[in-house]
Amino acid sequence: MSAHHDEQQELENAKHLWQTGGKWVFAALVAAALGYLGNVIYKGQVNSQNQEAATLAAQVKGDTAKLSALQQSHGKSAAAAQASLETAKTLFDNGKLDEAAAAYRWVLDNQKAPLFQAAAAQSLANVLLQQKKFDEALSVLNTPVDDSFAPLMNETKGDVLAAQGKNKEAAEAYQLALDKLPENSASRELVQLKLGQL
């Protein structure tokens, strides 16, 4: 009889607990489990999309139609930015400056990672320098970049200013690049050579 009474008491206690807050505890546990499951599914989808983007990027190989398709389907991926930079370089090397500039601009507009921003801005400025669009090149070089890329941007600024015959401003830009370059940087010698030629 005592065992039956204890079971009844436990059952009453469980009912009371359920009615006074157990529902909320259960709901919170279900919500946490669903949140965890959603996070796992989301990470799996992102990983799958990144792999798909990387596969498509490997097929681009300078083909602007394939690049355009990749940019449309995976525009925010690092693979699309990398493929755009590589294709732009190929286009530049083949003298297709307008198409190269468009690819670099796409990276600037669509990929905000510091490395991609700096690479695209500096490369686009070089394209514009070749096209003798000096003011536009200088404007692009004002793109905010991470401090570690400032020497590269200043060196390119010096190149644009030197091409315009603005030797004093070019010297200042080269000096800014030197001031921010580490002492053991391989780029120091080249920047010093450019500075010495002014």
Image (cartoon, rainbow, N blue to C red):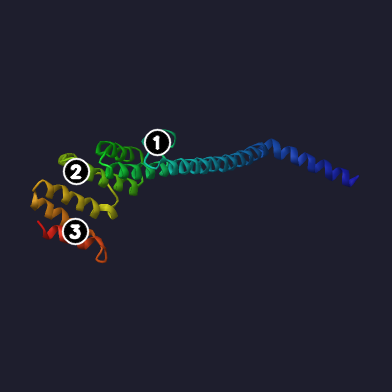
Q: Measuring from the top left, give residue 68's x and y in whole percent.
A: 38, 34
Residue 141 in sight from this viewpoint: no
Q: Is residue 68 above or below residue 10?
A: above
Q: Which residue is mark 2?
A: 130
| Residue type, label 1 | Gln
- Going 16% across and 61% down the picture, which residue do you hit? 192
| Mark 1 neighbour class, 10 Å CA radius: few under 14, some 14 to 19, many 20 or more | many
| Residue type, label 3 | Val
Query: Which one is nearer the viewer's eye here, 169 or 24?
Result: 169
What quarter of the picture does the N terminus occupy?
top right
- Going 30% across and 51% down the picture, which residue do you hit? 146
What's the distance in space between the residues labelled 1 and 3, CA to CA? 35 Å
Task: Please count the marks in the image.
Answer: 3
Would residue 55 be found to the left or right of residue 187 on screen? right
Q: Are marks 1 and 3 in contact (CB under 8 Å)?
A: no
Would residue 80 be found to the left or right of residue 174 on screen? right
Mark with earlier residue (3, 2)? 2
| Mark 2 neighbour class, 10 Å CA radius: few under 14, some 14 to 19, many 20 or more | some
Q: Measuring from the top left, give residue 13's x and y in whole percent.
A: 75, 41
- Going 67% across and 39% down the picture, which residue do you hit? 22
Would residue 128 be found to the left or right of residue 78 on screen? left
- Res 77 → quadrant: top left
Q: Which residue is mark 3?
A: 191
Of the numbered discs in the image, which one, if any, rests on residue 71? 1
- Res 198 → quadrant: bottom left
| Mark 3 neighbour class, 10 Å CA radius: few under 14, some 14 to 19, many 20 or more | many
Q: Is residue 57 above or below residue 159?
A: above
Mark with earlier residue (1, 2)? 1
